[in-house]
Image (cartoon, rainbow, N blue to C red):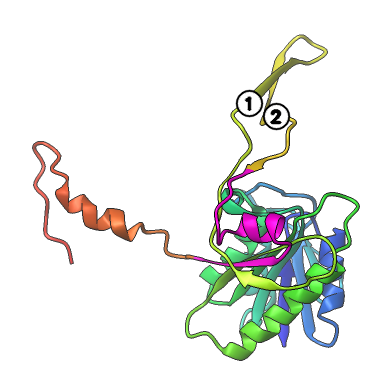
Amino acid sequence: MRVLLSNDDGVHAAGLRALVEAFDGDEVWVCAPDREQSASSHAISLHRPLRLHTLGPRRHAVDGTPTDAVHLGLNLLLRGSPPDVVVSGVNHGPNLAGDVHYSGTVAAAKEGALLGVPAIAVSLASPPPQDFGAAARFAAALARALHASRPRAPILLNVNVPPGPVRGWRPARLGRRSYGDQVTEKTDPRGRPYFWIGGEGAPVDDDIPGSDCNAVFREGLVAVTPLLLDGTDQRALADLGRLAPADYAREPGP
């Protein structure tokens, strides 16, 4: 199996090294940011050149975002010989619930799926010190199963692994978690204000049966969540027919 690995913690991150080891025996390509790019979401560098650094056989670093790394991996390094799967991670911390909208880890996998390759984002929901081995081995097993299933359309899976040995997994929906609404204001040595978004407390997870948060934190199971590539809200799309903005005619849709 040919695999493209990336992440948002940087090419030298321990979680990425664990993934490389878990795919021992496969044709592994690495194209990852040259430094940490956490919470970079799906940013892509369209207005500046990118530098690609070769660190070893099939191992490359990009001075850009996780999206940049996967884009170059698929459209440059592996052009004409696409991988069977893209795997992003193992992230140093969870990507649960609304985290998926901010996560560079998820964005790297999503870029792979958008470009036509089945993709997995995998995160370890554990504070430091972290042992990424179990999460990486689960991700490799899931990638092989995904490849063997030969999905008819690219699929994007978001995986969150609790600490310790994996004792089971289940499909899960996105939950809800809040980081609060605190903005901390401080003053630098020159007397200028600066701000930190979010407080110092841990995020609060809602108790939602069937959610990824519940699976990981309340049940100790790996949560596997399929994510949509088409972000259209189908229910809201149908309801738009009831709107009637003044002075504008509504044209019939398809």
Write the residue at 22% across / 51% down. Answer: 240
- 150 or 63, which lies in front? 150
| Quarter occupied by the N terminus | bottom right
Crowding near the residue tagged with mark 2, few <14, some 14–19, many ≥20 C-alpha atoms within 10 Å: few
Query: As displayed, is residue 250 above or below residue 219?
Result: above
Q: Which residue is mark 1?
A: 182
Q: Quadrant of residue 8?
A: bottom right
Find out whether residue 230 is within the magenta segment.
no
Query: As displayed, is residue 54 above or below residue 146?
Result: above
Q: Secondary structure at mark 1?
A: loop
Write the residue at 74% across / 71% down. Answer: 5
Disc with the residue nearer the chain's start (1 vs 2): 1
Query: x%, y% of residue 223?
Result: 65, 65
Query: x%, y% of residue 209?
Result: 55, 58
Q: Which residue is mark 2?
A: 199
User: Is 42 displayed left or right of 249 in the figure?
Assistant: right
For the record, the magenta segment spans: 205-227
Q: Quadrant of residue 159?
A: bottom right
Q: What's under tag 1, amino acid-wise?
A: Gln
